[in-house]
Amino acid sequence: MNASDPQWRDEWTLGDSFIPAARYTSAAFFALEMERFWPRVWQIAGRQDELREAGDFLEYRIGAQSILVVRTTGGALKAFHNVCRHRGRRLASGCGHFEGRSIRCPYHGWSWNLEGENVHVFHADEFDAKSLHPDQLHLVECQVDTWGGFVWINLDPQAPPLHETIGPATRHLDPAALDRMSVLWHKQVRLPVNWKAALDAFVESYHVPAVHPEYPELGTDITQFVYHDDGGGHSHYGIPLSAGKDAPENPDVDPRELFHRYVSYTIDEIGAMYTEKDRRLTERLRTLPLPEGSNIGAEYTKALYAYAEQAGIDLPAPTPEDFEHLGGNFVFPHFFTLPTLGNALAYRARPIDSKLTLWDVWSLTILPKGEADRPPAPQAVDWRNASEVGHVLHQDFANLAEVGSGMQSQGFEGLRINRRQEIGILAIHREIDRYLGAPRD
Ligand code: FES
Ligand SMILES: [Fe+2]
C-alpha cells in the first residue's frame, strides 16, 4: 500500500530494467488498469470500411464497456455507449446496419436517430416529463476519430485528440498508407496470457532466433534492427540504410533465391505482408541477372511498382529514409503492425481478464482500384491449431501460452529487460503508469 494512493502497491514499482511480475499477474493491478487506464486511452474499435453507409454500425467491447460506432446520416462517425437510457438494455451487438436509420431498443421500443437523439418513447405521456428531458435521453457519446483506416474511440470526453496522442508513432507509419489498405482476412484468438505479455512478444525481435528459427535461415538478421522509443508508450524498430552494407551474406544461397524463399515462406506460413503477386515477382527475379550496383530488394521494388501500375494498385512511395522506420511499429496502447510495400500484418490486443487476451490479426493489402469492399467478418480461431493461424503465429502463440503459465510461478519475480532490444516493453509500462497515477520518485 502507498500512503498517498491506497490502491497503489509498492511492489508494482517499475525498475530501470526490471518489471515486477505482479504487474502482469495481480488481480488488483488488473482492476486498476480497468478503472484508470482503459477508460482513458484511444483504442481501435474496427476498420473504417465496416461503416460505409449511413446506418452501418460496429460494436467494440473493452471489459464491461460496450461502444457502438455508427455512420450517421450526414456521413460522419459517432460513438455511443451501447446502452438504453430507459432500463439499461444493450442496444445492439456485433456489427450490422440500423434499418430505417433508427436505433431501436428491443426491450420496449424506444428509438434514437443516428445522431443519438431520442425520437421515440413508447407511451411517453405516462412518464414524468422531468425524466424525459432530451439531454437525459440522448445516447451518451464517446470520442471517435480515424487513422490508418481504423476507427478509434476514447471513452474519456476530456482525453486529448487522437492525432496528438498517436502522432509520435504515426509520423513513421504514415508512409505505409495503412488507410488505403483493405482487409484480406481478420482472425481472432483468445490467448491464455496477460494482454501486456502478448504485446511484449511482438514489440521485439529478440525472440526470433529461438521461437522462429526459420527466419534467420531466410536472411532475417536481428542484429541489424535498431529500436526506437518514440515517447507516449509508442515504439518501433527498423533497419538503418547503412546496415545492408556489411550484412552477412549466406554464401550458400543466392540472394535472389533467398528472398524468394523468404517471401514464399511468409505467404505460406503467415498469409500476410506479401501476396501471391509478390511470390510471382520474386520467382521471376530469381532467374534475372542482378544489374551491377543493384540488389534484390531494389530490383523487387522496381518490379513491384511496374506491376502495381498496370494492375491499378495505388502503392505508397516511401522514401529510403521512411523505409528505415517501417519495420515493426507499436502504437500505444494496443496496436502493432509490420508493413511492407502495399501490405501489412496488424495486431490488436485487448484484455478479457488478467490472464486472457483477445488478439486480433489482420492481413491488409492495397487492392486494385474499385475492388475494395466491406471487410470480411472476424473469424474466431484456436491458437493451438497451426493450420488455422499459420505456422509462424502458432510459434508465437504456443510460446505465449507458456509465458502466461510461467508468469504465475512462485519462482518468477519479474522481467529482466534487454536495454537495446526490449525497450519497447518498458515504454509500455511507463506510459501505463502515467494513467495509473504511479508515484514517481
Ligand atoms: S430498456 Fe430500452 S426501451 Fe426499455
Ligand atoms: Fe514472433
Image (tube, rainbow, N blue to C red):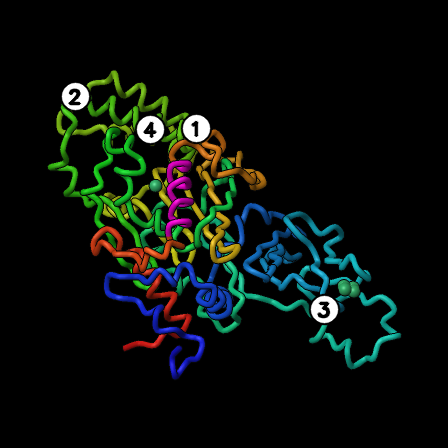
Q: Is the C-beta separation of discs 4 and 1 under 8 Å?
A: no
The residue at which mark 4 appears reads as 263
Which one is nearer the viewer's eye here, 388 or 319? 388
Q: Check if residue 152 falls in the magenta segment.
A: no
Residue 17, image x, y percentages: 24, 61
Q: Residues within 10 Å of mark 1 (few under 14, many from 20)?
A: few
Q: Dots 1 and 2: beta carbons under 8 Å?
A: no
Mark in the foreground, 2 or 3? 2
Q: Which numbered circle lies on residue 85?
A: 3
Do residues under tags 4 and 3 come within 8 Å of each other at their CB atoms?
Answer: no
Q: Amino acid under label 3? A: Arg
**Which quadrant of the frame does ligand 2 lie within?**
top left
The kind of residue tagged 4 is Val
Q: Does the magenta stretch include residue 398?
A: yes
**Contact, CB < 8 Å: mark 2 with mark 3?**
no
In the rendering, at what x and y percent does residue 399 appear?
Answer: 37, 42
Does the image show residue 278? Answer: yes
Q: Name the residue rendered at 40%, 59% in the picture.
A: 24
Q: What element carries label 4?
A: helix
Q: Nearer the viewer, mark 1 or mark 2?
A: 2
Q: Give the Cα distance between marks 1 and 2.
A: 35 Å
The crowding category of the residue bearing disc 3, from other C-alpha atoms within 10 Å (few below 14, some 14 to 19, many at least 20), is some
Residue corresponding to mark 2: 252
Q: What stretch is highlighted in magenta?
A: 393-406
